[in-house]
Image (cartoon, grey):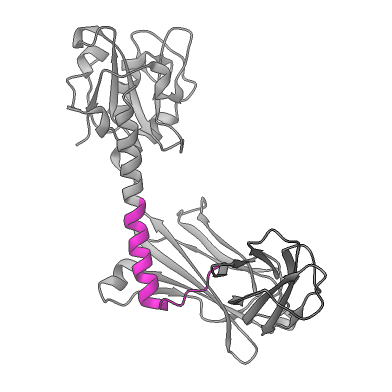
Amino acid sequence: MDNSKNIKMILSKETKRYIRLIIGIVCFILLFGINVIESHADDRSSDGVVVITQNSEKETSVRCEYYMTQALEYKFTVTGANSFESDWMSENTYTFYLPKSGDNVLTAYVRYAGDNSGNIIYQGTVSFYHNNCIKGICQMPYNGEGGGYLIGIESYENPNQRYSYEMLILDCNLYVQGLPAWIYTTTPCYTPSGNALWTVWQPVYGYYWTLFRVYDENNHMIGEEVYGFVNVPKTKGEEVVEDAMQYLGLPYKYGSSDLSVGTDCSGFTKAIYAHFGYNLSPSSKMQINDGVQIGLDELQPGDLIFWSSNNTDAGIYHVAIYTGYMYSDTEAQIVHNTVEGSWVKLQPMRYMGTPYKAVRVIQ
């Protein structure tokens, strides 16, 4: 198999991801500024590093690394919205409980083991925000009537319905055009502990941010979480692949293009493309001329791939539909019907050896 094909496809997918990421980052910075609260924070110097990781269910972990060979002891304190102080310990990692949402300052101290003189050889400070009001988010395709996305949050604690929750959706494409971009909001509403605030949303194709806010009993915002997602249309080639995937397990039948009883390799590609209005030739040798020939480094889902016994058109003996990386993150795949006694399969393209040529039917 030509390795250049794999490289090309990976770059193509990564390019799309970078484009989506750039649009999202631009929107985020314009909307919320650059003071973004991360789930990780750290303080680094030439001597040591303090790293904070905010866990679920109100727990926060801290790790302090100080680069010396002597035995050391560590101590951690938290001030701000929460107040906490650990004992001196030999372990450089500690997990602590923070009951309140808000801004905090964590300080890590390092001393030589057993040194009670008060001599501190390293001190690192990290500022961070802790939010214990939102337990989790739901942002996933909705398979019910009308389709769309199921979007929502689950409250972690809301005693006596003290907190209210709000969900908003921003259309990034509208925002960068200077147009009204807040296209959905629930307005603040009450959600008891352990319950979810959610909606079924059917967006047009594009790039979006979902914003979740939590307010206290005085209507002051005490928590905010932002998540981005992309809703992009499938290409025609991807639709061809999805259609072909419905026939996994269809038996091989030489000379047939009847999907109700079985097909051979070219009969399978002919029958699938017929669903999209294309009348392909009946044999793999002829189908090589049913589209525009492309390089193996230009393959996209839905393209036809051919194998030849002698690297000539006359030696073509097999055709398959290229699925690319739609069903695998690690290697390119094909869907095809192979030989007598077999059936329609999804397989890594390398199983068939090096392809001869490729054709794009849908322009």
If the image is split into quadrants, where does the N terminus sit?
Answer: top left
Reply yes or no: does residue 234 show up in magenta.
no
- Number of marks present in the image shown: 0
Residue situated furthest bottom in the rendering: 218
- Identity of the residue drawn at 71% across and 74% down: 157
Q: Main secondary structure of the magenta part?
A: helix
Task: Using residue 268 as the reference point, say whether residue 126 is left or right of it.
Answer: right
Pick the quarter of the image with the C terminus. Answer: top left
Q: Is residue 31 covered in magenta?
A: yes
Horizontally, residue 26 falls left or right of residue 126, namely: left
Range of magenta residues = 17-39
Within the image, what quadrant is residue 298 found in? top left
Question: Would you say residue 330 is visible in this rendering?
Answer: yes
Residue 287 location, quadrant: top left
In the displayed structure, 205 sits above or below 165; it is above
x%, y% of residue 115? 80, 73
Rendered view: 254 above or below 330: above
Tell me if I can see residue 233 in this picture.
no
Residue 338 location in percent, x, y? Answer: 41, 14
Of residues 314 and 201, the one drawn nearer to the viewer in this rendering: 314
Tell whether 336 sits left or right of 80: left
Percent of width and height locating residue 43: 56, 71
User: Which of the 4 quarters of the picture holds residue 269?
Assistant: top left
Residue at 72% x, 78% y is: 77
In the image, residue 5 lies at what x, y percent?
30, 31
